Image (spheres, rainbow, N blue to C red):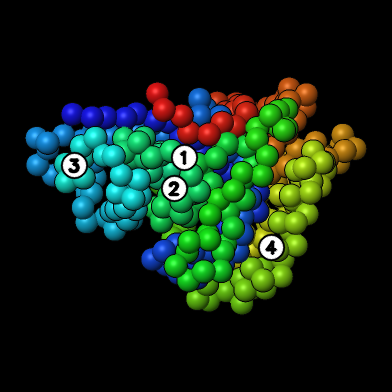
Amino acid sequence: MYSATCEAPVNMALVKYWGKRNEELILPINDSISMTLDANEMSAKTTVAASESFKQNRMWLNGEVVPFEDNARLMRCLEGVQRLALANGGLKFPLSWKLHIASYNNFPTAAGLASSAAGYACLVYTLARLYEIPMNEQLTTIARQGSGSACRSLHGGFVQWHRGIADDGSDSIAEQLVTAEHWPNMHMLILVVNDARKKTGSTKGMQSAVETSTLIQHRATTIVPQRIKELRTAIQARDFKTFAELTMRDSNQLHAIALDTYPPCVYMNEVSHAIVNFVHDYNESVGEVKAAYTFDAGPNGCLYVLAENVAPLLAAIQVAFPNDAQQSVEYLKGIPVPPVEL
Ligand code: PMV
């Protein structure tokens, strides 16, 4: 028997991916940029074992059996990595050996906390280790076919997923812009508003947006390309003010598109909106932009803040959200690392 165990972190988008131009290959209509978190804080951990004695491919997620062979996305990831393994040659066991895969998330699954990103990134990375394939950009094109945002979790630091132009998706890859060390005092807080599974998953939400939103194409063709340029410059210059404004505007635009979808998709709730108001009020009261928020396809808020401003921000959060928030505010270090083999 051969096995590998790896851990891959969650990433949080700053300029969001929302909308596909090819559902099967998961090709996005726009580029996106994210920051990868510290794997100790929010990550998926996956073990893959291959054995001659296994009768079928099997998978467990958080201890529960999940269908494997009839899950097209899982199979595409497995076949993609196996194709690369064949091309690399020198296999230490036959590709026909079946696999047992066990994966755990150390945070709520499918609650708008990017669990599928960490999960598929970890699956692809662990399979690559098992088949002895070194990290390369093709792995990001495979992880992308599990869950789009997963391709960004194969790198640490700040990462851009290029939409690409090729019909076969070969240039729709994730590229590391800078490593974590470039901006080591960038931190993130997660405000867990609700950790239940979301009502409309991102696949369905973005499909419906592409079909019905009258704003989404304008966002993809005009707004995002400019925003990507500006955010890249802000990250390079460690310009927190510009970084924060672009991030907050893009989160707001994602949810505006969700509301412009027909019927509308509502991901944020009253507490989420209270968090948005809190951040704007906080920045105004301190006379400087010291915090930024972003929300994915769920109600939970992510706040970006520099290390030196974490303590006063946390104190202000505890005053603004005195009861439930004290337990639900989870402080996460934003020191991002790439996936690692354990
Ligand atoms: O990769 P998916 O299908 O889980 O979609 C992710 C979509 C957002 O999280 C809302 C945005 C993003 O770029 O991660």
Q: What number is the disc on residue 135?
A: 1
Query: Marks 2/4: CA distance?
Result: 25 Å
Q: Could you tell me residue 228's position as x and y percent?
A: 71, 56
Please name the residue that numbered disc 3 is placed on.
94
Please name the residue that numbered disc 2 is placed on.
139
Query: Marks 3/2: CA distance?
Result: 21 Å
Image quarter hosting the C terminus: top left
Q: What number is the disc on residue 19?
A: none
Verify CB contact (< 8 Å) between mark 1 and mark 3.
no
Q: In the rendered view, tell whether residue 119 sits above or below residue 221.
A: above
Query: Marks 1/3: CA distance?
Result: 21 Å
Please name the residue that numbered disc 4 is placed on.
224
Mark closest to the chain's N terminus, 3 or 2: 3
Is residue 3 at all visible to an observer of this figure? yes
Secondary structure of residue under mark 1:
loop
Between label 4 and label 1, give the one nearer the viewer.
Answer: 1
Mark closest to the chain's N terminus, 3 or 4: 3
Q: Could you tell me residue 303's position as x and y percent?
A: 67, 38
Secondary structure of residue under mark 2:
helix
Secondary structure of residue under mark 3:
loop
Verify CB contact (< 8 Å) between mark 4 and mark 1.
no
